[in-house]
Image: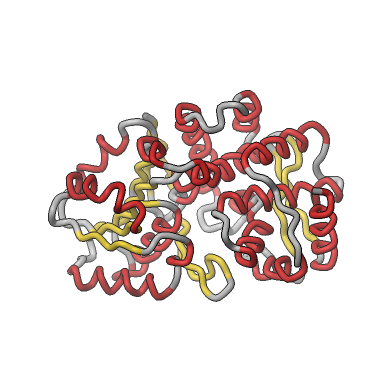
Amino acid sequence: MTDIKIKTASSESVVHCGAGAFEKYAKKHKGRVFIVTDKNVYSLYGNLMRETFGSEAVIKVLPAGEKSKNSRNLLSIIGAMAEAGVKRNGLVIAFGGGVVGDIAGLSASLYMRGVRLVQIPTTLLSQVDSSVGGKTAVDFGKIKNLIGTFYQPEEVIADPMFLDTLPKRELNCGLGEIIKYGALDGEIYEKLCKNKDRLYDCGFLGGITADCIRHKADVVRRDEHDLNGIRKTLNLGHTTGHAFELYYGRRPHGEYVLIGMYYELYIAKRKGVCGGEYSDNLISLIKKIVKVPAYADIENSAVLAKHDKKNSDENISLVVPQSEGKSAEIFIGLDEYIRLLNECGRSL
């Protein structure tokens, strides 16, 4: 078990990761806590929640899935917190995957201008990425994460015990983020290449999860509020992935990260930014996890990338792999972006 501390200008938090983290750290919060979860997680772990946090705990159960990450459910959570009498020193526990973590975190940041927050991520994606770093949000209209705050949890409890119940497709989602970290961090990249036949081994995943959290923790320490460009690197694969996710739907977020990374790698190669064995290895890792589709109607999906928060003008901003342990930001006009996405689709 590993403890990773994240000290930023606004707060200090700690990530407890590894086997036994839940048993050791969750029970200390027993009492009148306010838990946000979803139907799928509650069906698996509802009894564990009651046993761990006691009969005084209030549990708000949301429908499962990305569609629950909306302003209506946000206000419903805040209303339930008020009805439960949550005080200024109250504690919100986000017990679930990335959707639960995002909306519960945003609720905690807004209620009474901020109450304490603990994240207990139950999916590989949320353990390796979304529960760490303090980004909270809900989607609005056709724009992902449009309404949000930066709000650090006081603790994250990332225990691989929760991975045992995940179907392969949920593991794929987390592997999407892990491969993203491999494109950003040379040591993680080397581990992935050496263990490419162990990607679904929970023992391997437990160890590399801590590596990814360390990388993200270092980025968050240096750029908590995404102001100086360092944190922007964590969006590798996300600009195109988010656009495809919003337009086509029907796939988990992590798979869209991988698909977006594949298309953006193609653009990086055509722009002379990335290539050779390094690019080939990343593509091989992506294809081990997901079958990359050749999308029709690229034009209408690509237009959604114009709304990405990373863009500063009319150009599309893409963070792409450059070489082992290095990334680069490139800016591309919408017409060229659409043309290269179409080229990539035709090459599949």
Which percent across, then down, holds residue 29? Answer: 21, 48
User: Splitting the image into 4 quarters, where does residue 277 fall?
Assistant: top right
Quadrant for the N terminus in the image: top left
Q: Residue at x 20, y 66 (%)?
A: 87
In the rendered image, the vertical position of residue 182 relative to residue 235, given as above or below: above
In the rendered image, the vertical position of residue 125 relative to residue 93, given as above or below: above
Residue 109 can be seen, yes or no:
yes
Residue farthest left in this picture: 55
Q: Residue at x 66, y 51 (%)?
A: 237
Viewer-closest of 57 and 299: 299
Q: Residue at x 65, y 50 (%)?
A: 236
Side of 301 relative to 61 (left or right): right
Viewer-closest of 31 and 202: 202
Q: Residue at x 62, y 53 (%)?
A: 256
Which percent across, then down, holds residue 311? Answer: 69, 65
User: Splitting the image into 4 quarters, where does residue 108 fall?
Assistant: bottom left
In the rendered image, the vertical position of residue 107 relative to residue 224, given as above or below: below
Colour scheme: secondary structure
Residue 217 can be seen, yes or no:
no
